[in-house]
């Protein structure tokens, strides 16, 4: 069983040195999964960043997930891939990755949510819960009501994405969602370790799930 509780999505604007520092500190603070996002289309740079973070995560038990790019995930032997609706179809991604890798899919409305249950994916990213400056092309905002509805209509683990921060995290965790994905709340914090620890404590305090032992 994967631990999705505190899911860090990296900031592709940060240089490699800052990225490594953020991830290292965030993992010490309790992040349970790391997804590398790279939107600039430079595959060599993506692979370089992925290799550096994979080495950094080695021995921590924290999985490395690659955003969008199955080829990059295969190149560095990452633990999985997270797809958006305009990326490679999940069925093809699964064929390429094999059965033992994690495969996540973002869903942005009820139709995509329903269709995803026919696909070979391991978890769903529900996007966006609230408005967020890091993603301006969202189809809808699910809100707490939509998140609660989704929890009641799926057998798959759900990760909440979009606009999550220390101010609303307790209410989100209280829905029983399996994980929360965060970018700026950790990546842009002056002290990522302390930020991650505070967020993790909030999640563990308010989630109705049985708390798993700390990393």
Image: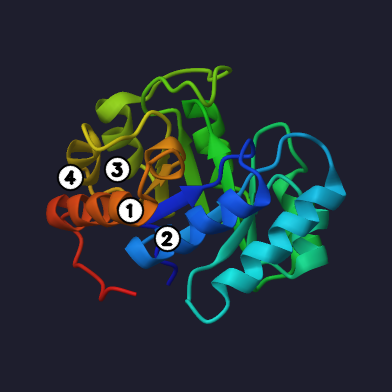
Check disc 2 and report its element: helix, strand or loop: helix
Residue beneath label 1, please? 196
**Dot 4 and dot 3 residues touching (CB under 8 Å):** no
Check disc 1 and report its element: helix, strand or loop: helix
Q: Which comes before the other along the chain, label 4 or label 1?
A: 4
Q: Which comes before the other along the chain, label 2 or label 3?
A: 2
Out of 20 and 95, give the one closest to the viewer: 20
Q: CA distance from mark 1 to mark 2?
A: 8 Å
Q: Which comes before the other along the chain, label 4 or label 3?
A: 3
**Residue 191 image offset from top left, x and y in percent:** 35, 49
Crowdedness near tag 2: few (<14), some (14–19) or many (≥20) residues, C-alpha within 10 Å:
many
**Dot 1 and dot 2 residues touching (CB under 8 Å):** yes
Residue 152 numbered mark, or none:
3
Residue beneath label 4, please? 174
Q: Residue at x 42, y 72 (%)?
A: 1
**Dot 2 and dot 3 residues touching (CB under 8 Å):** no
């Amino acid at each position: 069983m994967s631990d999705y509780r505190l899911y860090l999505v990296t900031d592709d604007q940060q240089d490699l040195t800052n990225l490594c520092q953020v991830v290292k500190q965030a993992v010490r603070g309790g992040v349970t999964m790391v997804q590398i996002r790279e939107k600039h289309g430079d595959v060599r740079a993506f692979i370089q960043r992925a290799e550096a973070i994979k080495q950094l995560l080695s021995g921590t038990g924290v999985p490395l997930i690659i955003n969008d790019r199955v080829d990059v995930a295969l190149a560095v032997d990452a633990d999985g891939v997270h797809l958006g609706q305009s990326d490679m179809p999940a069925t093809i991604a699964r064929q390429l990755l094999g059965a033992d890798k994690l495969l996540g899919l973002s869903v942005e409305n009820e139709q995509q949510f329903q269709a995803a249950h026919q696909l070979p994916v391991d978890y769903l990213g529900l996007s966006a819960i609230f408005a967020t400056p890091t993603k301006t092309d969202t189809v809808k905002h699910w809100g707490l009501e939509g998140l609660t509805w989704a929890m009641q209509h799926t057998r798959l683990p759900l990760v909440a994405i979009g606009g999550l921060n220390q101010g609303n995290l307790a209410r989100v965790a209280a829905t029983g969602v399996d994980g929360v994905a965060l970018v700026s709340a950790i990546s842009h914090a002056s002290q990522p370790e302390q930020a991650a620890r505070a967020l993790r404590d909030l999640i563990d305090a308010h989630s109705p799930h049985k708390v798993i032992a700390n990393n």
